[in-house]
Amino acid sequence: MDKKSITDIDPNGKKVFVRVDFNVPLSSKDPNDDIQVTDDTRIRAALPTLNYLLDHGAALILASHLGRPTSAEDKQFAMDPVAARLSELLGRPVIKVDEVVGEEAAEAAANLQPGDVLLLENTRFEPGEKKNDLELAEQMAAMADIYVDDAFGSAHRAHSSTEGAAQAMRAKGGPAVAGFLMAKELEALGTAVSNPPHPYVAIMGGAKISDKIKLIDNLLQKADKILIGGGMANTFLAAQGYDMGKSLVEEDALPEAKRLLEAAPGRLILPVDVAVADTFSADAVRTEKNVDAIESFEMALDIGPETLKRFTEELQGAKLVVWNGPMGVFEFEQFAKGTDALAFVLADLVEEGAMVVIGGGDSAAAVKKADLTDKMTHVSTGGGASLELLEGKELPGIAVLDDK
Ligand code: ADP
Ligand code: MG
């Protein structure tokens, strides 16, 4: 995953097509309203790449998807509110066109001078985008001299604005490289996948094991130990013969759970105690007990204090920790305790020099909720993309970029 980045190219006097992730939340779904961007985190996150290119004499052509429009008629997903916010953040005008490709877009791109910024319309307004339509990709690449991908969260999808446009840029002899955000993701996740320091402890949680069997398989090849919490621990515990009461247990995945436990004796560490409740609700009462004492009417919604202690011990001295999946139903305050406490343990490990990488959408949300995002080595911005990468898959949007 040694890919070239924007520091390996000379953007001076060039037009640079940047695939950004401006998929931001909006204030309204009604196209007649004055729609605003309600959280500009993703726009801000792109600024280092955009400012670097502008400071080095480039003109920018920016493209992103926004929401899930079904056609170009879904005007509530137009990029205009994004253009307005971006212009404020960059402190310079942003030219917005009402199409992704076509005469208007091509002419606006042709007229760009160094320092100018053009934002194209929502890439998903083009029906060819998700089909990785070649002609669409070629029209995108035709507007620019250099292709930059800074949208890690979309890298697991081969779309025209990701894989296709990079391919088309290469075909016309131009570079296709990573922006700073993408490069940071590749460095952190790439280390975990291809060159992990040891001891390497992985932590897995979340709802289901069936979603993550491939991930666990791959982690078992690389990590020294895997600590398992959250809903998926229930299925492992059930596979060991514990009665999990009303807990979320995936009956269909029991054979896989048994296989994994047998494949890695002593390396999959399961909870010894859990926090249970008799209803699945935010105001349910938290009761902590050993895993062999769960009543038929109870469900496990978090790890217990003994488990946290055991996990903390296993983590001491780790050089690398990869965490995916919350330890419990962190959306309910009473059952966020295990997840929060673990996040604090990991923040301490970072201070002691360990590399701690968080992958997965809900895991990132849980760390953010605990206000510890800045304390981790890296919190991936790409939910699905980070998991696929950790599974050992090659992501089309990354594979296509120029090698170092
Ligand atoms: P990520 O998005 O980080 O990959 P997942 O989507 O796999 O994580 O899992 C997150 C979800 O798992 C959360 O919504 C959380 O409520 C749920 N979850 C965690 N522990 C349990 C549990 N014991 N029972 C039911 N759901 C759980
Ligand atoms: Mg999730």
Image: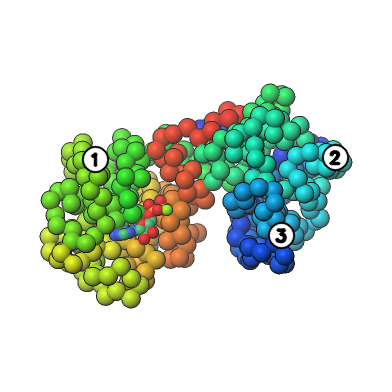
Front in this rendered view, residue 231 or 401: 231
Q: Which residue is mark 3?
A: 81
User: Residue 402's image quarter?
Assistant: top right
Quadrant of ligand 1: it is bottom left
Q: Position of residue 234 (x, y in %)?
A: 23, 54
Check residue 89 in the rendering and tell me which mark sits there, or answer none.
none
Q: Where's residue 58, x and y in %?
A: 78, 41
330 vs 400, left or right, is left
Element at badge 3? Answer: helix
Question: Split into 4 quadrants, where in the image is the C terminus?
Answer: top right
Residue 63 visible in rendering? yes
- The residue tagged 2 is 107
- Viewer-proximal residue, 103 or 184? 103
Inspect the image, locate mark 3, and give the three-letter code of the amino acid beneath it: Pro
Q: Earlier in the sequence, mark 1 or mark 2?
A: 2
Distance in Å between CA atoms under marks 3 and 2: 22 Å
Crowd band around label 2 with a 10 angstrom C-alpha radius: few (<14), some (14–19), many (20+): few
Q: Is mark 3 within 8 Å of ligand 2?
A: no
- Residue labelled with disc 1: 256
Is residue 363 or residue 223 the one in the foreground? Answer: 363
